[in-house]
Image (cartoon, rainbow, N blue to C red):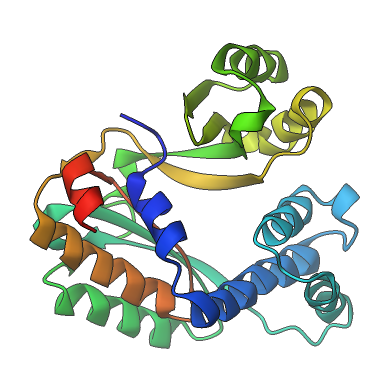
Amino acid sequence: MAGHSKWANIQHRKGRQDAIRSKLFSKLAKEITVAAKMGDPDPEKNPRLRLAVKEAKSNSVPKDVIDRAIKKAIGGDAENYDEIRYEGYGPNGIALVVEAMTDNRNRTASNVRSYFTKSGGDLGQTGSVSFMFDRVGEIKYGPEAGDADTVMMAAIEAGADDVDSDDEGHWIYCADTALNEVSTALEGSLGESETAKLIWKPQAPTEVTDLETAQKLMRLIETLEDDDDVQNVTGNFDLSDEVAAQL
């Protein structure tokens, strides 16, 4: 089954416009600030910051917002954020991994637990569902990068582990520790990628064929993503073509 999900594509297309955009900019800026604070403020010398800036640019974050986020870290006036991972089961036992950055662990834990409970899900312990996912680097190219064979050859040369291609583009996967190296090598052969980031990739996604379950899952994921402390939400599911069309 495809490593990238129809859910991500639907989410992208329906995009709750301005409110979502503003929240996304804020979350990407937070990642830039944290990355710059933890390492060198020069993206060329700090792989995590380089990838954070790349992700921000791919989502059309203005340059002044990116520069301001880096300066905030350099100036020492950035908040101290803890990076936390929450794991649990959503509707119908779908496993979810929730990544957060927070300056108040109690607030975030309480909110995330509440979201799971209200959706009929269950927040578990760390490690309760992450074993169903692989932590990998994901590099995305559009279809214009070349045909599947061309991209596959470039990916193998760059040290990637797997490629998933379809009409919408190419998703290249590599070891989490090799993301910066593979991404840089691919730029030499395929040009700049659309995105390059670390993800939790489901090992065996459950196909959701029931519309009601899909709607409940969407509501929970949207609620989680609306929380200012939550950076990313990943589930081990994919939507059937029929359900995707209805959504």
Q: Is residue 37 above or below residue 97?
A: below
Using the image, determine if residue 114 lies above or below residue 42: below
Q: Name which residue lies at 84% across and 83% down.
A: 76
Residue 70 location in percent, x, y? 83, 72
Instruction: Say which quarter of the image contains residue 216.
Output: bottom left
In the picture shown, does residue 95 fall above or below 137?
A: below
Q: Position of residue 124 (x, y in %)?
A: 23, 63
Q: How many marks?
A: 0
The C terminus lies in which quarter of the figure?
Answer: bottom left
Q: Is residue 131 left or right of residue 29?
A: left
Residue 88: percent from left, percent from top:
25, 60
Q: Determine whether, in the image, residue 78 is placed left or right of residue 199.
A: right
- In the rendered structure, the answer to whether residue 115 lies left or right of residue 23 reads left
Does residue 123 appear in this view? no
Of the pair 68 and 11, the residue shown nearer to us: 11
Q: Quadrant of the N terminus?
A: top left
**Relative depth, front residue between 54 and 113:** 54
Residue 158 visible within the image: yes
Q: Residue at x 18, y 64 (%)?
A: 215
Percent coordinates x, y for residue 130 in the rendering:
34, 47
Toward the viewer: 143 or 87? Answer: 143
Q: Residue at x 16, y 73 (%)?
A: 119
Q: Which residue is rendered at x = 50% and y = 36% of the image? A: 168
Q: Nearer the viewer, residue 40 or 68?
A: 68
